[in-house]
Image (cartoon, helix red, strand yellow):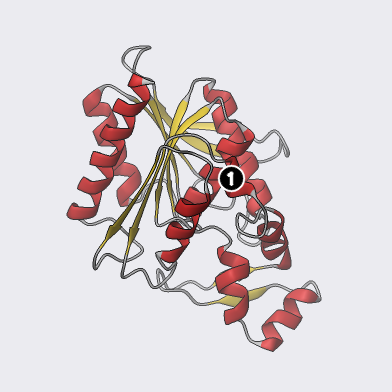
Amino acid sequence: MLHLSCTKNTQQRIAVIHHPAARPDVPNILFCGGFNSNMLGNKALFLEQMCLTRGWGYTRFDYRAHGQSDGEQGEHDLNDWLDDTLQIIDWLATPQLIVGSSMGGWLGALAHIERPTAVIGLITIAAAPDFPTDLIWPSLSELEQNQLNTGQAIRVGNNYDNKKWVFRKNLFDSANNLSMFSTNRCKLICCPTHFLHGTNDTDIPFEYSEKMFSSIGSQQAMLTLVKGTDHRFSGPLELNIVANAIDAMVMTLSES
C-alpha cells in the first residue's frame, strides 16, 4: 500500500493500492468507491482479482476521511474527494477506465469532465449524483437543517453500520456546486459509458441512472437495470454483470 501526500493539504495522505498492468497495451481500471465506503469492500476486491487474472492494471484508493486515508468524517466534502480522485489519475499518468460505485459514479463522471483525455471510459454502479441535496437534505428535520445552517455538525443513522454519520453544511454546499442535474454537466460526458443499477435500490433510485443516461453527450452509452437488485450491487449475479460490462468496455476501447 502507498500513501500519497495530498496536493491540497500536504499534512494529509491518501491510501492507494496499485497493481501495474502486465503489458503496456492493456487497460488500467480505477475503482472509485461510495460515500463512507472503503477500498476493502466486495466490489473493490472482486475487481482486483479480475484485473490480476487478466493482467490488467488496477488501482483502488480511499478518499480522505474514508478507510485508511487521513481525515475525519465531516471535515471533508465532494470538492476534496474529487481532488483526491484527480490526484490519483494524475499520479497514474495513463488512460483510465473508471468503475465508480454510488458516489464514485458521480466522482468518476466529474473526473472525466476534468480529465477527458485521461478518463477514456466510465462504468457506474448505482450512480448517486446530487444525492446530498436531492435525497439527504429533504430527509432531515427542520432542527437538523437549522443546525447545519448555523455551522453545527449533526449525526445521522444509516442502513450500513451502527455508527452515525457526521454531516456538516460543506457537504451539501459542495454537492450543489458539483451538481450534475442543475447544470449541463451531463452533456460533457463524452466517453463510452455504461450505467448499471438495481430496480430495488431504495437508497439511490434507479431513475438517477436513467436520467444521466438520457442526458450525457456520449453516443456510446448503455443502461442496464437489474430487476430485484438493491444498492449494494455486490451479489454473485451483480458482480458477474459488472465483469461482463468491463470486458465489453475494454473491447470497445481497444477498437477505438
Dot 1 amino acid type: Lys
| Residue 162 spot, x, y in % from top left | 43, 74
Q: Secondary structure at mark 1?
A: helix
Residue carrying label 1: 187
Q: Is residue 119 above or below residue 154?
A: above
Q: Residue at x 30, y 50 (%)?
A: 42
Q: Residue at x 51, y 43 (%)?
A: 108
| Residue 35 spot, x, y in % from top left | 51, 58
| Residue 5 spot, x, y in % from top left | 64, 33
Choose between 71 and 50: the one closer to the eye: 50
The crowd level at tag 1 (other Cα within 10 Å; few <14, some 14-19, many 20+) is some
Q: Residue at x 43, y 59 (%)?
A: 210
Q: Is residue 191 left or right of residue 110?
A: left
Query: Residue furthest toward the top?
Result: 24
Q: Is residue 203 above or below residue 233?
A: below
Q: Quadrant of the C terminus?
A: top left
